[in-house]
């Protein structure tokens, strides 16, 4: 039996693996310090400032929580996120070696 409360919020700041999440007004409107859950770390889910997230909070300490899900922009109304430019690394071109066939004697 888990006695965790689920809330939604928006990430306001982060450093390494600790995030500050502003909880939505209907859930209390407070600032919660949260870490990523294990499955989000395993699947390498990236988060940025302005992303909407779902967090689990213990009823005994509502200032600490765990980020369990990243919501898309349509699920929570928020300002558009400012994201850093990212470019994919250039792919290496492989050289194909063609081996000449041995000519059959006529």
Image (cartoon, rainbow, N blue to C red):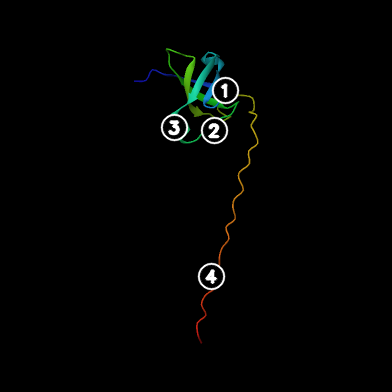
Q: Residue furthest bottom?
A: 106
Q: Is residue 98 above or below residue 103?
A: above
- How far across and how far down the image is residue 39, in percent? 44, 32
Mark 2 to mark 3: distance in Å?
12 Å
Distance from label 3 to label 1 (Cα)?
Answer: 20 Å
Residue under numbered circle 4: 99
**Cα distance in 3D space between marks 2 and 1:** 14 Å
Quadrant of the frame with the N terminus: top left
- According to the image, label 2 marks what residue? 46
Name the residue at 37% across, 20% down.
2
The circle drawn on residue 39 is 3
Disc assigned to residue 54: none
Query: Do the numbered discs 1 and 4 sit on residues whose CB atoms are within 8 Å?
Result: no
Residue nearest the observer in this picture, 45 or 73: 45
Mark 3, mark 1: which one is toward the viewer? Answer: 3
Q: Earlier in the sequence, mark 1 or mark 4?
A: 1
Asked if marks 4 and 2 touch (Cβ < 8 Å), the reply is no
> Helix or strand or loop: what does disc 3 sit on?
helix
Q: CA distance from mark 4 to mark 2?
A: 45 Å
For marks 2 and 3, the one nearer the N-term is 3
Point 63% across, 38% down: residue = 86
**Does label 3 or label 1 sit earlier along the sequence?**
1
Quarter of image, res 85 = top right
Q: Closer to us: mark 4 or mark 3?
A: 4
Identify which residue, 102 or 19, lies in the foreground.
102
């Amino acid at each position: 039996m888990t006695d965790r409360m689920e809330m939604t919020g928006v990430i306001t700041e982060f450093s390494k693996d600790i995030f500050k999440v502003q909880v939505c007004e209907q859930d209390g409107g407070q600032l919660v310090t949260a870490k990523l859950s294990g499955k989000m770390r395993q699947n390498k889910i990236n988060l940025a400032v302005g992303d909407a997230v779902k967090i689990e909070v213990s009823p005994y300490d509502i200032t600490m929580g765990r980020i369990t899900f990243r919501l898309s922009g349509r699920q929570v109304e928020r300002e558009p996120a400012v994201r850093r430019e990212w470019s994919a690394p250039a792919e290496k071109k492989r050289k194909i070696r063609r081996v000449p066939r041995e000519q059959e004697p006529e």
